[in-house]
Every structure is written in structure tokens, then in C-alpha cells.
Amino acid sequence: MEALRLILLFIHLVGFALLLGGAVTQFVSGRFRINPAMLWGSIIQLASGIALAAPLRGGGDLEPNPVKLGVKALFAVLIFIMVFFSRKREDVNKGHFMGIITLTVVNAAVAVFWN
């Protein structure tokens, strides 16, 4: 079971890298557009996050805080919605784009700093 959890965690981190890397690339280029890396990163993040949380519902000392999982799920769904519904636009609003980047970084901070 630990091997599966580590594989899912690795996939989750790859999704984070795609999402944030794609967003930073677009930000640096000066064109605020949703690229395929951002879309796939948000999908991978959401799916692997759900998969990571699901098997942990058995209880015990390693049980994550359900409020933390809820906050992370909320952020992941918001990010996915913001990316998915803007993906076909030529350009998106700078504030919308910065919201995606901010939510992505805050979601990672919740994962790291919230015990």
C-alpha cells in the first residue's frame, strides 16, 4: 500500500509541476493564455489528489485532517474550473491568471505547512 501511495504522490507532484510550470511560462511570456500543460496539470492534480485521500479513510495515526483535505479539494476544484472554462480563450484576464497561480501556490503551502 505504501508503494501505491508513493506512486500517487509522484503523479500528484508531476501534475503540480505541469500546472505551475505552464502558468509561469505563460506569465513570463507576457501572454495570459491557458496552455495544455496547465489543463493537464489541473486534471492530474485533482484526480491524483482524490486518489491519495481515498485510501486513507481507514483511521489511525496517519489519518490526515479532514478539514485540510476539504480545503485542498476546494482549491483543486476551483483551479480546475478556472483552467477548464478558460482554456479556449485566446487571452484571459490578468487577474484570473494570477488567481490560478496564487491558488496553486496556496494549495501547495496548505499541503506542506498544515499538519
Image: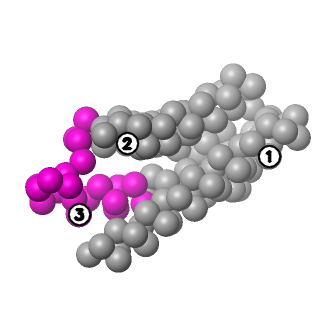
Instruction: List the single residue furthest toward the top.
Output: 95
Residue at the disc numbered 2: 73
Tell me the number on the disc at residue 25: 1
Q: Nearer the viewer, residue 95 or 106?
A: 106
The amino acid type of the residue labelled 1 equals: Thr
Residue at 79 percent of width and 46 percent of height: 25
Give how far across and how far down residue 6 sits, in percent: 40, 69
Helix, strand or loop for disc 1:
helix
Instruction: Find out whether residue 73 is within the magenta segment.
Output: no
Residue at 49 percent of width and 54 percent of height: 45
Magenta stretch: give its range.
Answer: 48-67
Instruction: Find out whether residue 64 is within the magenta segment.
Output: yes
Image quarter (top left, top right, bottom left or bottom right) of the N terminus:
bottom left
Residue at the disc numbered 3: 55
Judge left or right: residue 1 versus residue 36: left
Do tag 1 and tag 2 residues touch (Cβ < 8 Å)?
no
The amino acid type of the residue labelled 2 equals: Ala
As measured in the structure, the alpha-carbon distance from the residue carrying label 3 to the one carrying label 2 is 15 Å
Tell me the number on the disc at residue 80: none
Helix, strand or loop for disc 2:
helix
